[in-house]
């Protein structure tokens, strides 16, 4: 089934290793060689200590729901999928990502638990691009 | 504070475009800007040729060219709806530094007409950057427009502080009460809009879900709106026919731009920008007699009330509870124009905060165009807070009436 939702055009400079990682089924995040902290979205300088010495490492792909919302109105390909649940995920590495949650009932928002454990999964959107999603696992 | 700019300048006039709201025949952002500028110049007696600083969201060179003026100070700060409050801060600094005497802050936004005009006439840069942070990491997840993002803050507030949808709904109800006293408000009455006139908490909760926990009536309007204020040095302000409203304090700040970087989803940088403004003014939240609080959503207003020190942390909606902030209520009046929720909100609402705060403190809130009996309050001080982006940027003013 064709992927009908927005497919990003991977930026080829600062963000490329992230998108290459998604394609390979891995969550790749930038880590600072000076302070050791990770961050997201990928930067030119470490947002914690402003070092330009950054490396890419594979992250655990585990986290917890920080907060969420149920989208009853959306545009483009997402309009066909309403309602769906968006969430900000706290990764165990200490960074935060936005996602659409899998494994929840958008019609019972009160039953979704802030703090619930989630795991990453990747969906092939095109031959070139895969997109990270997070699934509730408890 | 060395060279404290407090009271170095005053807002000396404030006006809207000829028409605001849902302008059925359509308009453009440029027309909205220039109508408002024309109106504020007529109000104050200041000629456009006297304006030596121009402040707007991105459009200052075009405005100056339209007016045929050559300003010495050109500011296009565009950080969302809070920008206009920051423009006042910047104008105060420029006037205090002796660089300019008269600043124009202008707003024109065809939020409603843009649809009719197929996206033209907005003065917005066209096309979206596919390599921007939102295009890469937000749009793929169906995030589109402010409601889809702000809803996450309300969910977190309910989780962290035990607030409820009912608590936030009261903000919309109280704000609508003020709109019924403002004939220019979109939601003034059933005659101005089929959904206008008073509403109840149940109406808010039963309105269409847009992005749970936000229902339609938790969300601001999208209208056409133009507005302009003139700011003058103390000496100039005292020479004009209009009543000055003094800028006692001003501050701005930001906590993040992308919501991924919002550390605490229940707090904004208004705590910091208000701290700057209160400090400059030598005043505190307990001395504020009116609050004009950006209400893009009920949750925006609720959280901001906490940040401004008007309620304890986690209890923002209590500012509006039991009709305390409503006309004749027992607390301070809040959003006396009817707010972005029920008056007018074109996409960026900061100008509307400024115009209403000026009218209230200048004593012209019932001037026959902009209010009916009961709209004018007795407030002599006001705190004004704009919020822009995704709860990202804030500007705060402390304004004081002329004595
Ligand atoms: Zn670092």
Image (cartoon, rainbow, N blue to C red):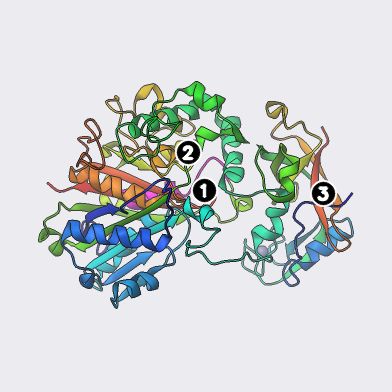
| Residue B99: numbered disc | none
| Horizontal side of residue B107 vs B233, given as left or right | right
Question: Secondary structure beneath disc 3?
Answer: loop
**Chain to which mark 3 belongs:** A
Q: Nearer the viewer, residue B219 or B370?
A: B370
Query: What residue is shown with label 3?
Result: A61
Q: Is mark 3 within 8 Å of ligand 1?
A: no
Q: Is residue A127 above or below residue A97?
A: below
Sequence-wise, the earlier of marks 2 and 1 is 2
Percent position (x, y) of residue B66? 33, 72
- Identify the main secondary structure in magenta: helix
Q: Tell me the number on the disc at residue B303.
A: 2
- Is any part of residue B111 visible from this angle? no
Depth check, front residue: B78 or B63: B63
Residue B268 is covered by the magenta coloring? yes
* Residue at x-position 31% and y-position 59%: B35
| Inter-mark Cα distance, 2 to 1 | 10 Å
Q: Is residue A13 above or below residue B230?
A: below
Q: Give me the C-alpha separation between circle 3 and circle 1.
A: 28 Å
Tag 2 and tag 1, C-beta contact below 8 Å: yes
Magenta part of the chain: B264-278
Asked whether residue A66 appears in the rendered view, the answer is yes
Q: Is residue A50 left or right of residue B331?
A: right
Foreground label between 3 and 1: 1
Q: Is residue A25 magenta?
A: no
Are callouts 2 and 1 both on one chain? yes
To which residue does mark 1 refer? B391
What residue is drawn where x is 60% and y is 45%? B149
Specify the quadrant of the image occupied by residue B289: top left
Q: In terms of secondary structure, where does tag 2 sit?
A: helix
Element type where label 1 sits in the image: loop
Q: Position of residue A11 (x, y in %)?
A: 73, 68
């Amino acid at each position: 089934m064709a992927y009908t939702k927005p497919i990003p055009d991977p930026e080829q400079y600062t963000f490329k290793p992230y998108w290459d990682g998604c394609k390979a089924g891995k969550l790749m995040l930038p880590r600072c060689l000076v302070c050791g902290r990770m961050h997201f979205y990928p930067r030119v300088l470490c947002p914690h200590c402003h070092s330009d010495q950054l490396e890419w490492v594979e992250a655990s792909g585990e986290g917890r729901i920080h907060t969420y919302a149920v989208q009853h109105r959306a545009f483009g390909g997402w309009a066909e999928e309403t309602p769906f649940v968006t969430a900000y995920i706290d990764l165990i590495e200490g960074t935060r990502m936005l996602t659409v949650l899998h494994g929840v009932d958008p019609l019972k928002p009160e039953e979704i638990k802030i703090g619930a454990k989630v795991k990453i999964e990747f969906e092939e959107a095109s031959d070139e691009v895969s997109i990270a999603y997070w699934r509730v696992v408890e | 504070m060395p060279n404290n700019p407090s009271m170095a300048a005053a807002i000396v006039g404030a006006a809207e475009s000829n028409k605001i709201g849902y302008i059925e025949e359509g308009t453009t952002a440029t027309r909205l800007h220039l109508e408002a500028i024309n109106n504020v110049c007529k109000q104050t007696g200041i000629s456009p040729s006297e304006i030596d600083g121009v402040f707007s969201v991105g459009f200052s060179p075009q405005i100056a060219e339209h007016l045929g003026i050559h300003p010495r100070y050109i500011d296009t700060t565009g950080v969302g709806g809070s920008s206009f409050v920051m423009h006042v801060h910047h104008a105060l600094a420029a006037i205090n530094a002796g660089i300019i005497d008269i600043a124009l802050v202008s707003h024109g936004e065809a939020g409603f007409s843009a649809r009719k005009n197929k996206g033209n006439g907005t003065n917005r840069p066209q096309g979206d950057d596919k390599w921007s942070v939102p295009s890469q990491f937000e749009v793929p997840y169906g995030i589109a427009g402010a409601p889809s993002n702000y809803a996450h803050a309300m969910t977190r507030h309910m989780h962290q502080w035990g607030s409820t949808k009912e608590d936030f709904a009261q903000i919309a109800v109280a704000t609508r009460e003020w709109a019924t006293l403002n004939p220019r408000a979109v939601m003034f009455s059933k005659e101005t809009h089929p959904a206008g006139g008073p509403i109840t908490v149940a109406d808010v909760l039963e309105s269409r879900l847009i992005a749970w926990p936000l229902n339609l009536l938790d969300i601001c309007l999208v209208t056409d709106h133009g507005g302009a204020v003139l700011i003058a040095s103390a000496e100039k302000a005292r020479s004009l026919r209009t009543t000055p409203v003094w800028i006692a304090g001003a501050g701005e700040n930001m906590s993040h731009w992308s919501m991924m970087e919002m550390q605490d989803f229940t707090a904004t940088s208004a705590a910091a920008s208000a701290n700057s403004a209160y400090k400059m003014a030598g005043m505190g939240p307990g001395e504020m007699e009116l609050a004009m609080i950006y209400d893009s959503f009920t949750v925006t207003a609720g959280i901001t009330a906490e940040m401004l020190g008007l309620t304890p942390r986690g209890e923002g909606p209590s500012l509006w509870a039991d009709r305390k902030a409503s006309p004749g209520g027992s607390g301070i009046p809040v959003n006396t124009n009817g707010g972005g929720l029920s008056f007018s909100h074109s996409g960026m609402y900061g100008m509307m905060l400024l115009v209403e705060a000026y009218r209230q403190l200048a004593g012209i809130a019932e001037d026959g165009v902009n209010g009916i009996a009961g709209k004018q309050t007795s407030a002599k001080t006001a705190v004004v807070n704009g919020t822009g982006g995704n709860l990202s940027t804030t500007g705060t003013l402390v304004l004081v009436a002329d004595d």
